[in-house]
Image (tube, helix red, strand yellow):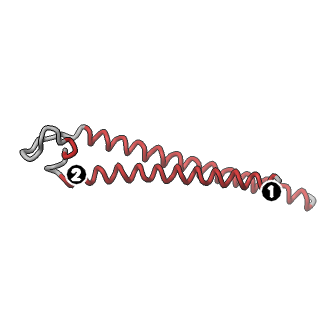
């Protein structure tokens, strides 16, 4: 039979193990989310770059910004998906940085 001090020590050890697993899962999830958003943004950007550009009569030779003049909805969808992926990626990265900064402050406070 364990003494109450030993039981408390074991409880704290188990809590630390569970906390570390939770932190590891959150880190893996956030890194995976950033990677998926980055890959999607690159794939959609590559798809937009390879989209067939058909010069219309209203499009001048230097009007490269109007590559979706004939198919405006396709352009809006592509830009929206790319913007969403990049926005999600930046949001997750900023959240990770904020949590890391707060975690460092909390760890320093616990040590003292």
Q: Residue at x 73, y 51 (%)?
A: 17
Q: CA distance from mark 1 to mark 2?
A: 56 Å
Tell me if 78 is positioned left or right of 102 in this view: left
Tell me if 59 is positioned left or right of 19 in this view: left
Mark 1 or 2: in front is 2
Q: Depth check: 50 or 23 in front?
A: 50
| Displayed quadrant of residue 10 | bottom right
**Rendered location of residue 27, percent (x, y):** 59, 48
Q: Residue at x 70, y 54 (%)?
A: 19
Residue 100 numbered tag = none
Q: Depth check: 86 or 63 in front?
A: 63
Q: Depth check: 56 or 48 in front?
A: 56
Task: Specify whether residue 1 is in view.
Answer: no
Q: Residue at x 19, y 44 (%)?
A: 67
Q: Residue at x 72, y 55 (%)?
A: 106
Quarter placement of the C terminus: bottom right
Quarter placement of the N terminus: bottom right
- Name which of mark 1 and mark 2 comes first in the sequence: 1
| Displayed quadrant of residue 60 | top left
For label 2, the residue is 74
Q: In this view, which residue lies farthest toward the left? A: 57
Query: Which secondary structure, mark 1?
Result: helix
Residue 12 numbered tag = 1
Q: Is residue 55 above or below residue 10?
A: above
**Rendered location of residue 91, percent (x, y):** 49, 53
**Rendered location of residue 48, percent (x, y):** 26, 42
Query: Which secondary structure, mark 2?
Result: helix
């Amino acid at each position: 039979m364990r003494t109450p001090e030993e039981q408390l020590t074991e409880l704290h050890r188990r809590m630390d193990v569970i906390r570390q697993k939770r932190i590891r899962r959150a880190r893996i999830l956030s890194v995976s989310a950033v990677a998926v958003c980055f890959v999607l943004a690159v794939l959609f950007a590559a798809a937009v770059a390879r989209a067939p550009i058909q010069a219309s009569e209203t499009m001048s030779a230097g009007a490269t910004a109007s590559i979706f003049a004939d198919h405006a909805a396709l352009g809006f969808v592509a830009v929206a998906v790319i913007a969403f992926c990049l926005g999600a990626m930046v949001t997750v990265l900023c959240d990770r940085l904020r949590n890391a900064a707060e975690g460092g402050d909390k760890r320093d406070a616990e040590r003292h």
